[in-house]
Image (spheres, rainbow, N blue to C red):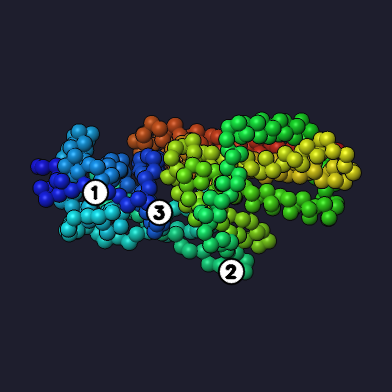
Amino acid sequence: MSAVPGAFTSYRPVLRPRVLLSDPLLDGAATVHLIKDAESGNSFKVGPKEHFLIARMDGERSLGEIGEEYAGAYGRRLGDAHWQRLLALLGAKGLLAGAPARTAAPGAPARTATPGPRALGGPARTTAPGVPAMTDATGVPAAVPVPVPEKRTLLRGSLPLVADADATTARLHRWFGFLLAPRLLVPLLVLVLAMEAVVVARSGELLLAVRELLTNPVLLTGTAILLWVSTALHELAHGVVARHYGGRVAEIGLRWRLPAVIMYCTVDDYLYLGTRRHRIATALAGAVMNLVFLLPFCALWLFAPLDDATHDAFAALLLLGSVQAFAMLVPLPPLDGYRIAGQLAGATGLAASAGVYLRLALRRSPEAAAYPRRARIAYPAYAAVTVLVLAGTVAAVVAATHHLLTA
């Protein structure tokens, strides 16, 4: 059978400029790629074979050439119906810049494009059940679950603060992007590490300062405001670093779950940033910003001639701010640490997939043995690290409580 139908052999398909393709990601026992139309926000899961074909639609290769590459890689040639079905689907989803006259393959189901998964820093959403499974190399891409828009109420909701979040982030990057240069970033990180060493070494003193802070309403309010500002800078740092690596920020706004009110910064194409290192740096940026924010207060606490109350307030701010930063690195959804863990594992839906795999493995189910080797390593490793982190957190809380009660 020919690689492509004769009428399409010379056709050179090209994806629209804002169509994004992710790296391969573990999804349970499967390996998938995410494809997203950044203009509409629609995204889909496809398998490695579909990705092989779609990623080569660059306007340079003809379908004949893509078909030959596919045959060389997978040992089979695609028939006319397969190509027609794939082209019809991509055209219907608006992913192609242009397409030849075609009709949908008989029996090909019509599917509605759906918005993509939650982006870094985006408002929490619930998803509808029933993600379609992938079929063969030219099956219909599975739609990502449909996000249900969050209803805004007095008690909970979100509100965008700027009309063009991407332009705002670009402006912030022009002003502060120089801090990401290694000649400045490395010394900052060294200072942060030194500060945290002091925090650990003098943690007993800082705990007592927190206790004193709770008895001073004025300084407690000031410290709470500074911690809120740190949280806002945390979110903006995600956006600036993402912009540094070519990402796009969709929204900057306020989210409230009364009594808590925080800022958010939605990095729309976080999963599609150029390299894994860029994605990890973007997720890590918020916690690093929290710690950098504390540096001047640490200097004042250590070296400035302060009255006792202000000295204790800065000490408490150092401890509480450090706890705030490191809490965001706990590898549980939806925290930044979970996104970092997902990138290290090369997985999407890491927590759910790890839970399913471990249940199968503990029951010695044959299905567990069918998981790829990478999954059999990544899922137990994620579970073990998460348990260790949570155990360490509990131990630290117990030790801190004991210190306060016996001091």
Residue 128, how many percent across, how many down?
A: 42, 59
Which residue is labeled 1 in the image? 13
Q: Position of residue 388 (x, y in %)?
A: 59, 34
| Residue 258 appears left or right of 353 | right
Q: CA distance from mark 2 to mark 3?
A: 29 Å
Task: Label 3, secondary structure: give it.
Answer: loop
Q: Which callout, 2 or 3, points at the residue further toward the start of the chain?
A: 3
Residue most extreme to the right: 307
Please tell me the numbered disc located at residue 153.
Answer: 2
Q: Which residue type carries mark 3?
A: Ala
Using the image, tell me which numbered label, if any, was put on residue 38.
Answer: 3
Say whether residue 285 is left or right of residue 381. right
Residue sitting nearer the eye, 87 or 329 = 87
In which quadrant is the N terminus drawn? Answer: top left
Picture mark count: 3
Nearer to us in this view, 14 or 102: 14
User: Eyeballing the image, is 183 above or below 404?
Assistant: above
Q: Are marks 2 and 3 in contact (CB under 8 Å)?
A: no
